[in-house]
Amino acid sequence: MNLNEQQRRAYLEAIGIDVWLPRGETDEEVDVQDETAAIATDDLDWLALRAAVSACTRCTLHETRTQTVFGVGDPNADWMFIGEAPGAEEDRRGEPFVGRSGKLLDQMLAAVGQSRQSVFIANIIKCRPPHNRDPAPEEASSCRAYLERQIALVNPRIIVAVGKIAAQNLLGTDAPVGRMRGKRHSVGNVPLVVTYHPAYLLRSPSQKRKSWEDLCLARSIVREAQA
Ligand code: URA
């Protein structure tokens, strides 16, 4: 089965339409998506992308998730925040950054005049890794095309990479956050700023000042683009 056909079926199933298969093509045959194959998300609109994510079985995280965590906010936002992966609370509620670190993220947003409704918030991966372990590289790469399509659809003026895992995945490096933050990077033609993860800031509140500086840098990039 080619990928477009696979995506069409995933989409139909996700919106509750039964998919009839020719005799001999069993559920088993169509159930497993090929995680090594590239997925074509370039033509997907928000609805189709959301449906493809919620039907995704490209890596084993689908076996343990309660639900996928797609992302939240303004689909035309100037600011896009990208975190690591859903935690337990996010997996339960289907929304990114709703646990303890999410509350701090909300305060960080408010400090630069934003809110979870005015920005778009997503994660590198859309399913919770069991026991909140770091996402494996193959899980991040299975999910990459969904994130790339989200970035293309939002077309933000700035991406803020929240924490080490997000920054390293987006920038393709293993540099520590301390070396990546405080600078202007880019992903394609979208400027990107790295900051500390709120979970880290909860453990190391003395770093909050640096995180504030990172958000000020991001804000100056947005203002520059608006001028
Ligand atoms: N941490 C993240 O990186 N993302 C979430 O959605 C929640 C916690």
Image: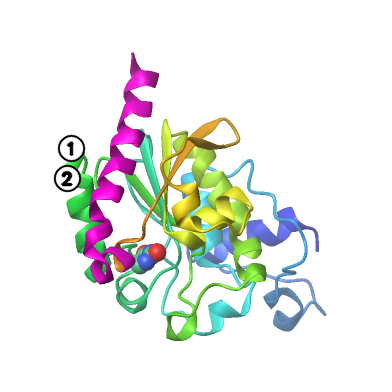
Place of residue 46 in the rendered image (x, y in percent of width and height, measured from the top left): 47, 46
For image coordinates 21% across by 60% down, the residue present is 104
Left or right of 161: which side holds 49? right
Q: Quadrant of residue 152?
A: top right
Q: Label 2, secondary structure: give it.
A: helix
Residue bearing mark 2: 110
Q: Can residue 56 be seen in this view?
A: yes
In the rendered image, which quarter contains the N terminus? bottom right
Q: Quadrant of residue 197?
A: bottom left
Left or right of 179: which side holds 173? right
Magenta-highlighted residues: 200-227
Q: Residue 113 carries which label?
A: 1
Is 213 one of the magenta-colored residues?
Answer: yes
- Ligand 1 position by quadrant: bottom left
Q: Is residue 77 visible?
A: no
Q: In which quarter of the image is residue 182?
A: top left
Place of residue 18 in the rendered image (x, y in percent of width and height, measured from the top left): 57, 69
Left or right of 119: which side holds 191? right
In the rendered image, which quarter contains the C terminus? top left
* 68, above or below 25, in the image: above
Q: Label 1, secondary structure: give it.
A: loop
Place of residue 175 in the rendered image (x, y in percent of width and height, measured from the top left): 57, 56
Left or right of 138: which side holds 67? left
* Amino acid identity at mark 1: Gly
